[in-house]
Image: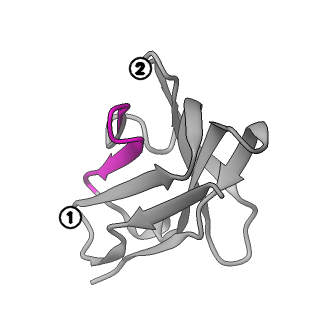
Amino acid sequence: QVQLVESGGGLVQPGGSLRLSCAVSGRIYSINDMGWYRQAPGKERESVARITRGGSTSYADSVKDRFTVSRDNAKNTVYLQMNSLKPEDTAVYYCNADVGAYATGMRNYWGQGTQVTVSS
């Protein structure tokens, strides 16, 4: 059974930083693209950042130059370093990954979400 477990959310003041982590576990043989999405109250879920297995990255315009996505393939983990946080970054952040599992083949998976609140 594949699981994506996020950590690192919390309450931070405007201008502050947080680092999110997402670890993939289970009987897996490959992880392709990994990424982060977020959903604010009353809004649709949106893509924040993605990273390929080879390390190519892409970002939403709203977070460019403030957020950095990275991954450690040896640890099956993806990270999101968030700097210069703004109140509009407040949302539930979800990890997403294309995971190849021995039982089910290549499928797309979501984490359970972690709350990020930016407020003074």
Q: Is residue 87 magenta?
A: no
N-terminal-most mark, 1 or 2: 1
Q: In this view, does 40 lie above or below 1?
A: below
Residue 9 location (% of width, % of height): 36, 71
Q: Which image quarter holds the C terminus?
A: bottom left
Which residues are the magenta region?
71-84
User: Tag 1: residue type?
Assistant: Gly
Q: Is residue 60 visible?
A: no
Pointer 2 residue: 55
Question: Looking at the image, which residue is at 57% across and 46% down?
Answer: 27
- Local SS, label 1: loop
Closest to the observer, 35 or 76: 76
Q: In this view, does 81 lie above or below 102?
A: below
Q: In which quarter of the image is residue 4?
A: bottom right
Of tags 1 and 2, the one toward the viewer is 2
Residue closer to the observer: 91 or 61: 91
Q: How crowded is mark 2: few (under 14 residues within 10 Å), some or many (20 or more)?
A: some
Identify which residue is drawn at 38% across, 31% down: 73
Secondary structure beneath label 2: loop
Q: Quadrant of the N terminus?
A: bottom right
Q: Residue 16 carries which label?
A: 1
Q: Residue 78 in magenta? A: yes
Q: For mark 1, does the 10 Å Cα neighbourhood hold few (<14), some (14 to 19), or many (20 or more) residues?
A: some
**Horizontal side of residue 35 vs 119, given as left or right:** right
